[in-house]
Amino acid sequence: ETGVTQTPRHLVMGMTNKKSLKCEQHLGHNAMYWYKQSAKKPLELMFVYNFKEQTENNSVPSRFSPECPNSSHLFLHLHTLQPEDSALYLCASSQVTSGAYNEQFFGPGTRLTVL
Amino acid sequence: AQTVTQSQPEMSVQEAETVTLSCTYDTSESNYYLFWYKQPPSRQMILVIRQEAYKQQNATENRFSVNFQKAAKSFSLKISDSQLGDTAMYFCAFMKTNSGYALNFGKGTSLLVTP
């Protein structure tokens, strides 16, 4: 595997289900991100992890719970979701160096549908 | 907060022709980066080109070039000799240099290249 991978690619769940999205980066990066991409809206940054520590949480509802066990893996745990949470969830990674530009590399995304 | 505006939801261009996608942004920062990302129908987001705000020279990458007008806060993307593989969503994005790592995206422009 190369780059940033995400599983599953598609997920359908009911509002009472609990599921998890997984992201893995094979680039040796130290930062990972979750974005939400909804139709007709800009990509929204949800969470940022730098060196496994969460550095940003953009007012995301608590029904979304991130986990970063190491610098290569990032999870998004989902529970009690709403239909409006249906979207494409993108993971990205980058190598963060203080004061320097860092390109973010994206995974293919997980298409989530909440019934 | 930074906002990124892409005023063209959809555009089309014939193969081998040139097309320009527009982007404007609003910020009080003096140092930042601007990006154009491409998201083909397969959904993997890839970086097309980037521009550092402190550089006056417009960035170019093969058939892709930008027209960066800092005073006007404008950052358009020109695609020359369009190819069928250029069909994709194109997102303009902004990143503060001292913010950490958050990318602010526009809503995107859907570009269709026709034979």
Image (spheres, coloured by chain):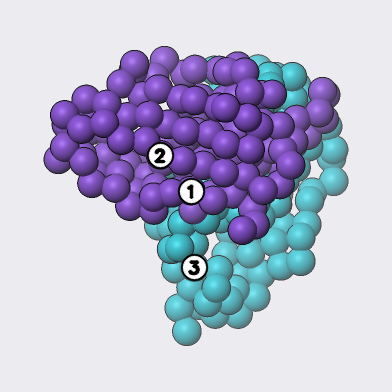
Residue mark closest to the camera, 3 vs 1? 1
To the question of a shared chain for discs 1 and 2, the answer is: yes
Position in image of residue A43 (x %, y %) = 45, 37
Please report contact status of discs 1 and 2: CB closer than 8 Å, yes or no.
Answer: yes
Position in image of residue A18 (x %, y %) = 26, 31
Q: Which mark is residue A21?
A: 2
Q: Residue furthest front?
A: A69
Residue type of the residue flagged with mark 2: Leu
Residue for point 59% across, 73% down: B82
Between the C-alphas of marks 1 and 2, the distance is 7 Å
Residue for point 55% across, 68% down: B86
Q: Which mark is residue B47?
A: none
Position in image of residue B112 (x %, y %) = 44, 68
Between the C-alphas of marks 3 and 1, the distance is 23 Å
Q: Nearer the viewer, residue B33 or A86?
A: A86
Q: Colour of chain B?
A: cyan
Secondary element type, mark 3: loop
Residue type of the residue flagged with mark 1: Gln
In the drawing, does residue A88 fall left or right of residue B22? left
Residue mark closest to the camera, 3 vs 2? 2
Position in image of residue A113 (x %, y %) = 24, 44
Residue type of the residue flagged with mark 3: Thr
In the drawing, does residue B56 fall left or right of residue B86? right
Q: Chain of mark 3?
A: B
Q: Nearer the viewer, residue A98 or B95?
A: A98
Secondary element type, mark 1: strand
Residue for point 71% across, 67% down: B63
Residue receiving disc 1: A6
Q: Which mark is residue B87?
A: 3
How many residues crowd mark 3 within 10 Å: few (<14), some (14–19), many (20+)? many
